[in-house]
Image (cartoon, coloured by chain):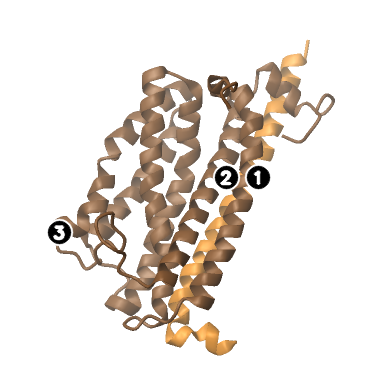
């Protein structure tokens, strides 16, 4: 397993590349979900203001 | 199929539920293709005779670079639509694609640096291909910044559409840079006019990862466009029904 992870001495370069991709995808998906929640929340607040007499 | 009126989906209200279904579909397609691509790329594909194992970065580097260029062209396409038709949805699509395009441009540069170090002996050179790709990342960041700097969404749509169209000239520069200038970056591995210069399993892995990146970009853009629709149509009745906790039938 550790021999496979070492990737013939290139492990650092390969896993830095794949690791950053994984991190970027995790961050983007988290931001997407969060902004959906925030947008719905703001839309609800705007409706509530609108319905005030 | 002929019975479907496609123009119906040009309205955000009818596009919203369709985009929701497609987001999930393309998300799962992206996951399955990535699993297949990584399996072929790391388990089946052999070690490269010249580069050893470091070449395996190609499975994310090339798809990311292709997507970074392609997404910019798609943004320019939607920008033409939004300027010509003055329609809402094309601008929203252009807006939704920019962050994912920036992500792929960044990943192309990052993985290129970590591939360049073991192969060329350096993380970065001011080479035509690398520099023009860096400009592409800045164009994406410029689109995002310009949008957030203009309060009126319709004015922001027009400004961003113009920037996108001016910037699209950079895409052929990136693509042909390895032919027009002497660069450290290698020439095209895959081209329309010649047989691929790589082993079949390596090519298979790279194409699977490319299709996965396509599906991911579609899923991410559709997810983001639905959020943009909620933001920009917040005062319409249908969004009100969508987000209202009393009348809500499903989570937005």
Measured Cα–Cα span from mark 1 to mark 2 = 7 Å
Query: What is the x, y in percent for residue B35?
Result: 59, 64
Q: Secondary structure at mark 3?
A: loop
- The quadrant holding residue B126 is bottom left
Q: Identify by letter the chain in orange.
A: A
Do the residues indicated by labels 1 and 2 lie within the same chain of the protein? yes
Judge the density around disc 3: few (<14), some (14-19), many (≥20) Cα neighbours within 10 Å.
Answer: few
For disc 3, the marked residue is B181
Q: Nearer the viewer, residue B104 or B187?
A: B187
Q: Mark 1 and 2 residues: CB-CB less than 8 Å, in contact?
A: yes
Horizontal placement of A36 versus B167: left or right?
A: right
For disc 1, the marked residue is B24
Q: Secondary structure at mark 2?
A: helix
Query: What is the x, y in percent for residue B64?
Result: 42, 57
Give the mark nearer the N terminus: 3 vs 1: 1
Residue B5's place in the image compared with B224, above or below, is: above
Give the mark nearer the N terminus: 3 vs 2: 3
Give the mark nearer the N terminus: 1 vs 2: 1
Let me know if residue B158 appears in the view.
Answer: no
């Amino acid at each position: 397993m550790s021999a496979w992870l070492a990737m013939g001495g290139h492990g650092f370069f390969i896993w830095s590349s794949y690791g950053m991709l994984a991190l970027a995808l995790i961050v983007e998906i988290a931001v997407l979900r969060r902004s959906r929640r925030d947008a719905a929340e703001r839309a609800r607040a705007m409706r509530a203001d609108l319905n005030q007499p | 199929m002929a019975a479907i009126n496609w123009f119906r989906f040009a309205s955000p209200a009818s596009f919203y539920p369709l985009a929701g279904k497609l987001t999930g579909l393309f998300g799962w397609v992206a996951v399955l293709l990535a699993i297949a691509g990584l399996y072929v790329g790391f388990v089946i594909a052999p070690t490269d005779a010249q580069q050893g194992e470091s070449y395996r970065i190609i499975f994310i580097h090339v798809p990311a670079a292709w997507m970074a260029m392609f997404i910019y062209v798609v943004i320019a396409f939607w920008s033409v639509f939004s300027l010509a038709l003055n329609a809402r949805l094309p601008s929203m699509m252009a807006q939704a694609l920019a962050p994912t395009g920036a992500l792929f441009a960044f990943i192309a540069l990052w993985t290129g640096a970590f591939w360049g170090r073991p192969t060329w002996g350096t993380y970065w050179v001011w080479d035509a291909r690398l520099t023009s790709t860096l400009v592409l990342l800045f164009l994406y960041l410029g689109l995002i910044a310009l949008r957030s700097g203009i309060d009126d969404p319709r004015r922001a749509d027009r400004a961003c559409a113009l920037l996108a169209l001016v910037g699209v000239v950079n895409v052929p520069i990136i693509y042909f840079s390895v032919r027009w200038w002497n660069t450290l970056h290698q020439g095209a591995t895959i081209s329309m006019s010649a047989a691929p210069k790589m082993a079949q399993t390596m090519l298979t892995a790279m194409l699977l990862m490319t299709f996965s990146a396509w599906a991911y970009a579609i899923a991410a853009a559709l997810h983001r466009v639905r959020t943009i629709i909620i933001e920009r149509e917040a005062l319409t009745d249908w969004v009100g029904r969508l987000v209202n906790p009393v009348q809500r039938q499903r989570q937005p």
